[in-house]
Structure formats: structure tokens, C-alpha cells
């Protein structure tokens, strides 16, 4: 049986779906692990009892804990660059350029953006509880979660001249403008922190990224909202992993079906060949050799040669057209069951007997 060919598109689809399902499954497992740790993390109130709890804890450290408090700076706070009355402890200023780029495949303009300028500023800050107990937050820029809110957003649109419009259509790019944004973690905002809680040797409480590799969270939302966001993320990755696996299984089923159909064709050809050989064996009619006519027989063999391979004699009749033009092996190798002479469909083949 000839080799089973796998098309490039089928191989690409199968490989892509398997790779995507593997990546999505790994991300789902990571999200699920983070979610399980969040659900198991103990909650603590920032008050005087927190130090007592850490003093009796081995190593004066809680590897993964949830706290919530009001943001207060240690020293001078940051002032918004656009609204002077807004004070904060974290500030992120972004300037992004927006362009329209012509997509020749979809024949549409697609939006593209790039960062022209980014500035991140931070000052030390603490989370303050009900009785002025403070927990200092370390490495806040390493934390996940929404811990800043937008305080300024302005789009600077570009005005075009006639020459600019002509140049844009020639280059395939249109400059829309620049978007200027500012995000800040405001002083007094309620912040939920999830991380490693430690009691330092000088008696200060610190919240830092977990040393065991768990994810560090700072969020201006409450803990239940943070938990819901992580559940949603894990659900999305799970759905994508299942969808990719189903797509891969579909490609495998398609390949299996194609392979089975090829096997059926092979079995049918073998059955037809056995039947053809049986009919020829039941009717052994051959031309008796005549002495001294070797040259004539050679000439007749060339005239009776298969029009496809030009080596084997024509030994079959194609029905319903009745043409005798090829050997049985070449007939079975035809890509379509059509007569090579008249292109009529072949319904059956019978042996040709020479008398």
C-alpha cells in the first residue's frame, strides 16, 4: 500500500491546536493554583494584635496572607501632573501613538499603537489599619492586580493637510494622534494586599512578594472581587484549553477518516485485481507461437503496448466505452476512473483475451 500523505495545512492545524491546548492548559493550572492559594490564604485585620500573631509564628512570617488598609505615604506624597489636588504614592504616565495601518489581506484599516514615553514614579507607603497600626508595602510595582486608577486621559488628534492625506494613502499609514494618560494610587485609597507578611527585627510590619513563588497582589478592589477576577481568568484558560483540544481531536478524526477511506480504496482495488486474475485464469486463451514469426510477434507487441506505461500489453477492456488502451496495473493507477481515450466514466473492467 502507498504511503498515507498528510497535507501541510492538516499538519499545521494539528500542531497548532495541540501546542495551543498545551499552553492554555499550563496557564489554566497556574491560574487554578493561584486561585486555590487565594482561597486558602488567612485574612488579618491591621491592628495591634497583628504583631502579637507574628511574634508567635515561626520565623515571624506568614507566607501568604490577606490584609486591607488605607494608603498613606511615608514622607512626601506625589502630586498629579495634571490635577494638583490629587496626591498619590504611585504614578504612571504614558504617551501612546495611535496609527491606522492598511491591511492588504483584509482590505481594511487596522488600529496600531506604540508607546512613545513611559514614566513610573513611586514613594514608600504603608497600609494603615483602624488603630493606626501600619504595614509597609514593599516592591509594589511587582504586584499583579488593579492597584492604580486613571486620573487623566486626553487624546491629541492630528490635523491633516491635503499633502498629508496623499502621503498616507501612498505609505499605507495614517497617524490618528497621541493618547496621554496618567494613573495613580491615591493617598487614602483602600488597598487589598496579598503576599508575605513579616515582622522585621525593628518591630515594623512589612508586606512583600512571597518567597515561595506565589503571586503577589495589590488591588484597589475588595478581596471578593479579586477572587472573582481570578476565577474568571482560570475559567477562560480552561475553556480555551478545551476548545483547542477539541479542535486537535477534530483534525485527528479527519485524518483517521481519510486514512480509512484510503484503506477502503486499497482493499477494493485488491478485490478487483483478484477477480480480474480469476477471470483470466478461468479463460486461458493465448495465441500459439508460430515458428519463424518472432519479428512479427515483436511488432505486434509494440502495437499492443499499454498507452500509459508502454511496456505491458493491453490486457483489459474498459466498460462501458469498450476501449482497449492500457494494462490493468495502469488502470488501477488512474487518479480518476475515466477512460484515457474518451474520458468517459469506467463502470467495470473485464480481461482481454487474445486468440
Image (spheres, rainbow, N blue to C red):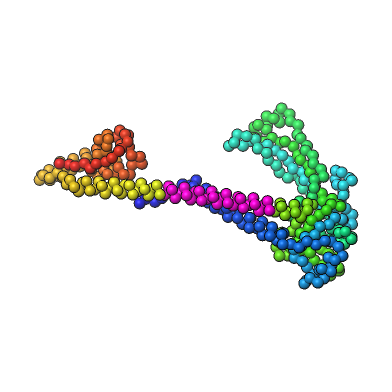
Highlighted range, magenta: 231-259
Q: Is residue 189 visible?
A: yes
The answer to if 210 sits in the magenta stretch is no
Viewer-side residue, 321 vs 292 = 321
Which x, y percent locates residue 312? 25, 45
List the single residue furthest toward the left. Answer: 291
| Magenta stretch prevailing secondary structure | helix
List the single residue furthest toward the top. Answer: 162
Identify the residue at horizontal 35%, vertical 39% (top origin): 336
Q: Is residue 276 left or right of residue 239?
A: left
Q: Is residue 302 visible?
A: no
Identify the residue at horizontal 84%, vertical 61% (top origin): 46
Identify the residue at horizontal 47%, vertical 49% (top origin): 253
Q: Is residue 350 left or right of residue 187?
A: left
Viewer-side residue, 352 vs 81 = 352
Identify the residue at horizontal 82%, vertical 68% (top origin): 53
314 w.r.t. 58: above or below: above
Which x, y percent locates residue 237? 63, 52
Which x, y percent locates residue 297? 16, 42
State the image quarter where residue 181 is shown.
top right
The answer to if 232 sits in the magenta stretch is yes
83 w.r.t. 231: above or below: above
In this rendering, the count of numbered labels is 0
Which x, y percent locates residue 81? 85, 45
Where does the C terminus fall, quadrant-wise?
top left
State the image quarter where residue 99 is shown.
top right
Viewer-side residue, 85 vs 248 = 248
Amino acid at each position: 500500500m502507498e504511503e498515507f500523505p498528510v497535507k501541510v495545512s492538516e499538519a499545521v492545524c494539528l500542531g497548532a491546536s495541540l501546542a495551543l491546548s498545551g499552553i492554555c492548559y499550563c496557564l489554566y493550572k497556574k491560574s487554578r493554583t493561584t486561585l486555590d492559594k487565594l482561597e486558602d490564604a488567612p485574612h488579618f485585620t491591621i491592628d495591634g494584635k497583628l504583631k502579637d500573631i507574628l511574634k508567635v509564628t515561626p520565623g515571624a512570617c506568614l507566607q501568604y496572607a490577606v490584609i486591607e488598609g488605607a494608603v498613606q505615604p511615608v514622607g512626601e506624597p506625589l502630586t498629579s501632573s495634571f490635577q494638583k489636588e490629587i496626591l498619590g504614592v504611585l504614578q504612571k504616565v504614558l504617551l501612546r501613538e495611535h496609527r491606522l495601518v492598511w491591511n492588504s489581506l483584509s482590505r481594511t484599516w487596522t488600529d496600531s499603537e506604540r508607546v512613545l514615553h513611559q514614566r513610573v514614579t513611586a514613594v514608600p507607603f504603608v497600609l494603615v489599619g483602624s488603630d493606626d497600626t501600619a504595614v509597609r508595602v514593599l516592591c509594589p510595582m511587582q504586584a499583579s492586580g488593579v492597584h492604580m486608577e486613571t486620573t487623566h486621559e486626553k487624546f491629541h488628534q492630528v490635523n491633516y493637510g491635503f499633502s498629508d492625506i496623499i502621503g498616507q494613502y501612498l505609505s499605507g499609514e495614517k497617524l490618528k494622534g497621541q493618547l496621554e494618560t496618567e494613573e495613580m494610587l491615591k493617598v487614602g485609597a483602600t488597598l487589598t494586599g496579598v503576599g508575605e507578611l513579616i515582622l522585621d527585627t525593628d518591630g515594623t510590619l512589612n508586606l512583600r512578594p512571597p518567597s515561595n513563588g506565589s503571586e503577589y497582589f495589590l488591588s484597589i478592589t475588595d478581596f471578593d472581587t479579586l477572587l472573582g477576577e481570578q476565577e474568571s481568568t482560570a475559567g477562560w484558560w480552561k475553556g480555551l484549553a478545551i476548545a483547542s483540544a477539541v479542535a486537535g481531536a477534530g483534525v485527528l478524526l479527519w485524518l483517521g477518516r481519510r486514512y480509512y477511506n484510503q484503506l477502503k480504496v486499497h482493499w477494493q482495488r485488491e478485490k478487483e485485481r483478484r477477480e480480474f486474475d480469476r477471470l483470466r485464469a478461468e479463460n486461458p486463451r493465448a495465441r500459439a507461437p508460430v515458428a519463424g514469426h518472432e519479428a512479427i510477434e515483436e511488432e505486434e507487441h509494440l502495437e499492443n503496448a499499454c498507452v500509459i506505461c508502454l511496456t505491458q500489453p493491453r490486457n483489459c477492456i474498459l466498460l462501458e466505452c469498450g476501449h482497449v488502451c492500457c494494462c490493468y496495473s495502469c488502470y488501477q493507477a488512474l487518479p480518476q476512473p475515466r477512460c484515457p481515450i474518451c474520458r468517459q466514466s469506467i463502470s467495470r473492467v473485464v480481461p482481454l483475451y487474445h486468440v
